Image (cartoon, rainbow, N blue to C red):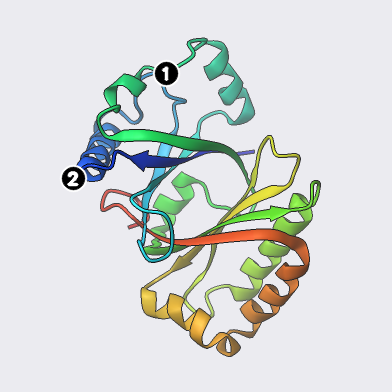
Amino acid sequence: MHIYLHETIDPVRSPGAHNRYLDEIGHVVATEGNAKGSAGGRCIANWVPVFLTGQWPQIIGFWQMPGGWDGFADHFDTHPELFHEPLERWYGERSGGFDRVLIGTDYTPTLDEIVESGTRAPVVLHETIRVRPGDTPEYLDCVGALKEALGSMYGFGVLGAYEVAFRNQSEAIVIWSFPDFKTLVRTQSAPEEFPELQAWREKSTQLETANTGVVVRPTSWSPLR
């Protein structure tokens, strides 16, 4: 079972802060792997929302954590400090954030699989979904069936889907990959061209209690770019 760290970061509202933060994270990923005192994850992406589709400025960080649940537990049992060391390092560029721990589905590629296959996702639709408590497994099974049905037919599809831990199986993250904005927009403007997706949207309204989608793009140093 693969465990991921999903972080939504609010940059300081001052000129250049968001770029300085991303440059620093890119340097850390390239030279250190992860910042000292953090959870030891390997960075899959840092995404920036397209400003017309969500809150801005904002940054979404996505990391694969080593060792699954055992690695998660070992890290925090051996790091009892209340605030991890890099917090002071980035106070100048970020004002706060919100973290989630995610459990990957069996049809979600790991970072190594993404790199090995050369998978790219230059345009991403990032969905945060709420369902009734206990329904996340059923919902994610349906997303997996959709991923298989879409395949490579249209050039876009489900990149990965995750259960959000510590939510009583009531929240999920689904990440869609698109080759460009024209393809993404076509799924909105002409849904009848994609019957499998259209059928899913109708079905998902019966399963979801809330769905918040935001369009994001990865940084230049992300494996997905």
* Residue type at tag 1: His
What amino acid type is highlighted by mark number 2? Pro
Looking at the rendered image, the disc whose residue lies closer to the viewer, 1 or 2, is 2
Crowding near the residue tagged with mark 1, few <14, some 14–19, many ≥20 C-alpha atoms within 10 Å: some
Indicate the quadrant where residue 196 lies: bottom right
- Residue that protrudes farthest toward the front in the picture: 13
Instruction: Estimate the x, y position of residue 68 in percent, counting from the top left.
Output: 60, 31
The percent position of residue 23, horizontal first and vertical second, equals: 22, 40
Q: Which mark is residue 123?
A: none
Residue 138: % across, % down = 78, 56
- Residue at 58 percent of width and 84 percent of height: 194
Query: Is residue 3 among the parts visible in the rendering?
Result: no
Which one is in front, 175 or 48? 48
Where residue 209 appears, as percent x and y from the top left, is 72, 59
The residue wearing badge 2 is 15
Up-down: is 87 above or below 47?
Answer: above
Q: In the image, is 73 to the left or to the right of 134?
A: left
Secondary structure found at label 2: loop
Residue at 26% over, 44% down: 18
In the rendered image, the quadrant that contains the N terminus is top right
Q: Is residue 52 left or right of residue 155?
A: left
Residue positioned most to the right: 134
**In the rendered image, which quarter is residue 31 located in?**
top left
- Quick one: 75 or 211, which is closer to the camera? 211
Q: Image point 74% across, 58% down: which residue?
A: 139
Q: Which mark is residue 84?
A: 1
